[in-house]
Amino acid sequence: MDVLSSAEINLSHVYAARARIQGHVCRTPLRLAPALSELVGVEVRLKLDCMQDTGAFKIRGAMNSLLSLDPTQAERGVICVSTGNHGRAVAYGAKKLGIPAIIGITPHVPPIKVRAMESLGADVRILGDDQEAAQHAADQLIEEEGYTEIHPFDHAATIAGQGTLGLEVIEDMPDLDTLICPLSGGGLLGGTSLAVKTLSPRSWVTGVSQARGPGMIDSIRFGRPVSVPETPTLADSLAGGIGLNNRHSFQLVRDYVDDFVTVTESQIADAMAWLYRHERIIAEGGAAVGVAAVLNDLAGTLGPKTTIVISGGNVDMDKFTRIVEGWRPED
Ligand SMILES: *Cc1c(COP(=O)(O)O)cnc(C)c1O
């Protein structure tokens, strides 16, 4: 079944994930974007995982991982490192399933996301100044305390869970020409491109990252995982590298994704404001990068049936309002 990639994850894992998480995660709409379609001259749809439970797609992979634990692992508890949305998803799922959870964060995680995790009863701890340092501290806790890690992007269960988004897209639009999707560690796009390309090999898939530290794109261009400096960005949910010992997502993204694009801070802000004004959608920075690429004509020729993934909507409302009112960050 998995003819394109040498990775260990294939479409059957994505189907298994879907069966496992059904009832815990909702099927999000693939909605026509009339204003954007009008602007670019092709039918553009938005896959609205900003409407997903916990406000981002991350619940797909987190739930699949939590539901795959054996009873001993579930009793000992789980740990994860997160830029916010993954931690919130793990906290939510862990609470639902009665599993103790430690969420490791950095000081860069926006307060709105920290509060959401704490209000779910998770043990939220700043474990390091950047994602890599936090991961290192988490590794130590795992070794000492026997917690099970729920990885934000590089475990098979996470990737298979995120791949259910791609499955839904291709089921709702079997004649998909172009898919444009946010890209950071590559759990979302690794799983989604695997599902889309296996079921519809002719679909063209583009990954979009922030120009400030695009860890996966730098790694793909370099030919192996490289570290990137973690710079503050409006796309906070895309910050961080892919891990120098990356096991799955690098390979999947390299093998299944056709093109890569980066967008600047002001382009991200413009896209957030545009989406709200013209489509009435609240997207966080990391979720607006696909629309930013399209608005700036960076995503190449769009096929007659195009889908852009809106991966989350967890943005601080004051910040969001300022952006809609015209505030722009420096590039
Ligand atoms: C985590 C996240 C991404 C990136 O997903 P990866 O699997 O790390 O590539 C994109 N958008 C949002 C809203 C996220 O929370």
Image (cartoon, rainbow, N blue to C red):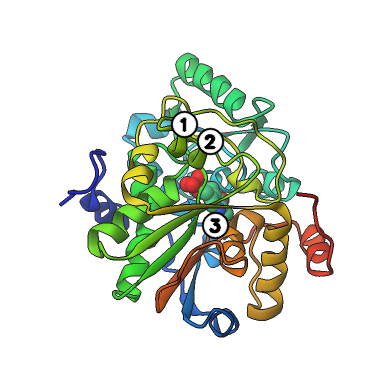
Category of crowding for the residue at label 3, using alpha-carbon neighbours closer than 10 angstroms: few (below 14), some (14–19), many (at least 20): many
**Secondary structure state at the residue bearing disc 2:** strand
Query: Considering only order in the chain, which callout, 1 or 2, is on the residue closer to the N terminus?
Result: 1
Category of crowding for the residue at label 1, using alpha-carbon neighbours closer than 10 angstroms: few (below 14), some (14–19), many (at least 20): many
**Residue 82 placement (x, y as % from top left):** 57, 38
The count of marks equals 3
Q: Residue at x 74, y 57 (%)?
A: 266
Query: The disc labelled 1 sits on which kind of residue?
Result: Gly
Q: CA distance from mark 2 to mark 1?
A: 6 Å
Query: The disc labelled 2 sits on which kind of residue?
Result: Ala
Is residue 117 among the parts visible in the rendering? Answer: yes
Mark 1 sits on what residue?
Answer: 77
Query: The disc labelled 3 sits on which kind of residue?
Result: Ala
Q: Residue at x 36, y 31 (%)?
A: 247
Q: Does the Cβ of the disc 3 residue fall within 8 Å of ligand 1?
A: yes
Looking at the image, residue 208 sits to the left or right of residue 126; the answer is left
**Residue 176 placement (x, y as % from top left):** 34, 72
Category of crowding for the residue at label 2, using alpha-carbon neighbours closer than 10 angstroms: few (below 14), some (14–19), many (at least 20): many
Q: CA distance from mark 3 to mark 1?
A: 23 Å
**Residue 197 placement (x, y as % from top left):** 28, 58
Mark 2 sits on what residue?
Answer: 101
**Secondary structure state at the residue bearing disc 3:** loop
Q: Nearer the viewer, residue 301 or 74?
A: 301
